[in-house]
Amino acid sequence: MLQEFYAVAIRKTQLPREAARKVVAKYAEWDPIRTDPLLIVSASKLEEDHSLALWDALIVEAALRAGATKLLSEDMQHGRRFGGLLIENPFRP
């Protein structure tokens, strides 16, 4: 998903490529949540129950598994909550 961040950061915020690479490198140090069958099953339930795209549901489910309290997304509804997880659009004016 870091590729999506990089693409959006340089396109929508005009963040210099070098700065965007540094952010990606920093985030790459984190311990990622692996996609496994249970993640897919849980995400498919979120997709069904909350009318999400499967890809968004996978991201939400991974964030929940990681214990995140905030998820930055330009694609999901700003202010929406999934349990203790808050969706925020970082590009919202």
Image (cartoon, rainbow, N blue to C red):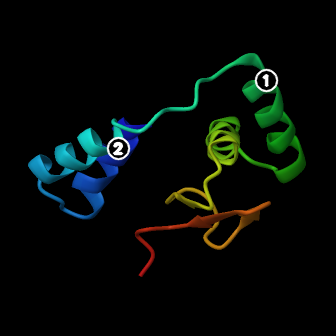
Q: Where is residue 19 in the image (x, y as percent from the top left)?
A: 14, 53
Q: Badges 1 and 2: C-beta atoms under 8 Å apart?
A: no
Q: Name the residue beneath numbered marker 2.
A: 27
Three-letter code for the amino acid on which mark 1 is drawn: Leu
Q: Which amino acid does label 2 sit on?
A: Tyr
Q: Position of residue 76 (x, y in %)?
A: 61, 58
Query: At 25% from the left edge and 64% from the top edge, which residue is drawn?
Result: 13
In the rendered image, the residue lying farthest to the top is 37
Secondary element at tag 1: helix
Using the rendered view, name the quadrant where residue 83 is placed: bottom right
Point 70% across, 36% down: residue = 54
| Label located before the other in sequence (1 or 2) | 2
The C terminus lies in quadrant: bottom left
Q: Judge left or right: residue 25 versus residue 53.
A: left
- Left or right: 29 as drawn, with respect to 62: left
Q: Which of 46 and 69 is in front in this view?
A: 69
Q: How many labels does the image show?
A: 2
What residue is shown at x 65% (from left), y 50% (from top)?
67
- Name which residue lies at 64% across and 44% down: 56
Q: Position of residue 75 (x, y in %)?
A: 55, 56
The residue singled out by tag 1 in the image is: 38
Asked whether 76 or 37 is in front, the reply is 37
Instruction: Please tell me whether residue 38 is drawn above or below residue 8 in the rendered image.
Output: above
